[in-house]
Amino acid sequence: TIEQREGELGKLCALLPETPLQQFSEDISKQLVSDLSILPRNFPTERLKTKQWSKSGKPAIAVSTQQKYFDLYREVIEFSLIGSDVEAILGQVEVKSSEDGGSYEPFTDKELSTIFNGCVYLAECHQHNKRKEYMYWLPLLGLFTGMRLNELCQLHVADIKQYQGVWYFDNNLNFHDPNVEDKQLKGKGGKRASIRLVPIHDELIRIGFIDFVQKQRIGDNAHMLFDRLTMSSRGKWYKEPSRYFSQYLEELGVKEGENKHTKVFHSLRHNFITALTKGCYGHNKLINDAHEKRKRIIGHSLPDEVTQGYTTLGAEIVQAWKEVIDLVDYDVNLSHLY
């Protein structure tokens, strides 16, 4: 949005030197990339101008966000200096690649047990009757699907489907109202890896997720899976759940000390990817194309992106992927939720 782009330009102005663009050089581009690599998350633009932000000690923005800022920087240079040697300014500078950023850590089995035995999950606790559906389900879905928080928050009830007895999530950009773009996904283009089908793990079914979905289908306005969420000005749905989960972790003592910035909802995605990898390679029988299946379930691009761009997979693949996702296992007892 315009508001979002203005905010991004404001941060770039705060990071870059007050030098005419015609005098920009490759050294300035290198310094920008270096600064972006340590730029703290959600850091106020006005405080960036004080030059003290590099010592904040807070986790840096994700690599994908660093790339977004550098791409915007490139656009500004190319637009403003038409006819100049733009490549001399940009040089061979690149943002170092990393999948989903590496600053978050997975939860330990002990921490997972603490999370799913917290008040929200115990009927005898006072919070149990005050909870909202997303408080209960989102951490479980993150643990057994590996989907990103906003991907889960923006799901429509119609995105939970069944094919020949296999339930799955259809992670798509199909809008409930064609006049309201109420979904966003990572990546660019219609063939982005984040558009994918994710089979529903048997543990989620045992806990009662399908029953919850069927309940959410009732009603004239029942199109959002989690109907008490509101969209932010940036078109995201995760603001309230993200804040809640962070507070929940603090109450449980999981988010403290060195863990304060490294244990977040996205940590569940790290747990899932690790468990999926262990499941595939620790299984007693060979799984055909295990590497490709894992990447497609997770929503990561394949090494051969050209092939991925030409490949259209329908619901028939969920049966083959179901056997893979059910290999995800944790040393955590969730039977009290069945």
Image: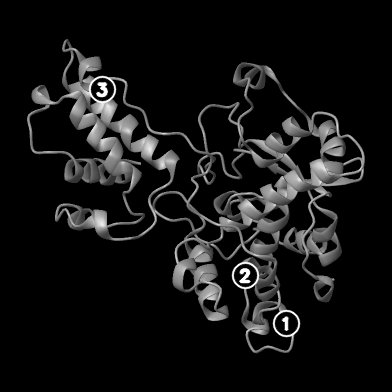
Task: Give the quadrant of residue 176.
Answer: top right
Amino acid type for the residue under numbered disc 1: Leu
Could you tell me how far apart the alpha carbons at marks 3 and 1 are, in whole angstroms?
Answer: 56 Å
Count of picture labels: 3
Query: Split into 4 quadrants, where in the image is the N terminus?
Result: top left
Q: Note whether residue 160 is visible.
A: no
* Secondary structure category for the residue under label 1: loop
Q: Position of residue 87 (x, y in %)?
A: 25, 16
Viewer-proximal residue among 111 and 191:
111
Mark carried by residue 103: none
Give x and y (percent) for residue 172: 64, 39
- The disc label shown at residue 122, or none: 1
Q: Residue reaching furthest top?
A: 83
Does residue 337 lie above or below 284 as drawn?
below
Q: Earlier in the sequence, mark 3 or mark 1?
A: 3
- Residue 251 in picture, x, y percent from top left: 53, 80
> What type is the residue that disc 2 sits on?
Met
Left or right? Give the position of 3 relative to 22.
Answer: right
In this figure, which residue is indicated by the disc labeled 2?
135
Secondary structure beneath disc 3? Answer: helix
Nearer-N-terminus badge (1/2)? 1
* Residue 15 percent location from the top left of the image: 20, 43
Please name the residue that numbered disc 3 is placed on: 90
